[in-house]
Image (tube, rainbow, N blue to C red):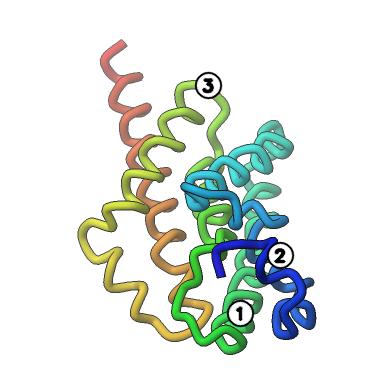
Amino acid sequence: MKNLRENWKKDPFKKNIFWIFIVSGGFIGFIPPFPGTLGALEGLFIFLIFKNTSILTQSLILIPLILIGIIGSRRIIKIFKERDPEFVVIDEIAGMFISLIGKKEWWELAGAFLLFRLLDITKPFFIKDLEEIPEGVGVLADDLVAGILTNLILLSFKWSYLKLL
């Protein structure tokens, strides 16, 4: 299911194009070779639209993103019988967005991107276990926790750095 062009005319694909569009981040998830990284970049670009809003507003934007991600991922899993299809990048979009909440400086944005991708790819600690949660929640859970950890690590670094000044 990696190739958009090959699957475009297949029946399950055509019937579910709305959800495929949503969970693939507007078909970004079909661009090789690193769809997860492109999904995280998309999350960064979406966040930039809301960068100058309050933390509350940023958090409120995240809620429907997560809910749509869970619903969409669940549907795609049932239709295509794959646990976490590679083209599904809404989890990276949401995880990246959560890692950026409250961040404004360029180094925070760059650091969040690098650290989030590191945590998302390596899945240290208990993050890997979160993938075992059934259906759409499991697709998003590991990325959301990686995003939360990224945000907290950057916040700790910023506070430590400010104390040194």
Name the residue beneath numbered marker 2: 22
The residue that appears at 65% across and 41% down in the rendered structure is 47
Q: Earlier in the sequence, mark 2 or mark 3?
A: 2
In which image quadrant can residue 51 be found? Answer: top right
Disc 1 residue type? Ile
Vertical position of residue 15 compared to residue 38: above or below: below
Q: How far is the residue under mark 2 from the one under mark 3?
A: 28 Å
Q: Left of 117 or right of it: where is 126?
A: left
- Give the camera-side residue of 8 and 82: 8
The residue that appears at 51% across and 30% down in the rendered structure is 109
Disc 3 residue type? Trp
The quarter of the rendered structure image containing the N terminus is: bottom right
The residue that appears at 53% across and 46% down in the rendered structure is 40
Is mark 2 in CB contact (under 8 Å) with mark 3?
no
Q: Position of residue 104 (x, y in %)?
A: 57, 27
The furthest residue to the left: 125
Q: Which mark is drawn over residue 76?
A: 1
How dense is the environment of label 1, judged by Cα within 10 Å: few (below 14), some, or many (20 and up)?
many
Vertical position of residue 155 compared to residue 32: above or below: above
- Give the camera-side residue of 64 and 42: 42
Q: Position of residue 90 (x, y in %)?
A: 59, 61
Q: Foreground mark, 2 or 3? A: 2
How dense is the environment of label 2, judged by Cα within 10 Å: few (below 14), some, or many (20 and up)?
some
Q: How far is the residue under mark 1 from the one under mark 2?
A: 10 Å
Q: Position of residue 123 (x, y in %)?
A: 28, 57
Question: Tag 3's secondary structure?
Answer: helix
Name the residue beneath numbered marker 3: 106
Q: How far is the residue under mark 3 from the one under mark 1?
A: 35 Å
Q: Position of residue 21 (x, y in %)?
A: 73, 64
How dense is the environment of label 3, judged by Cα within 10 Å: few (below 14), some, or many (20 and up)?
few
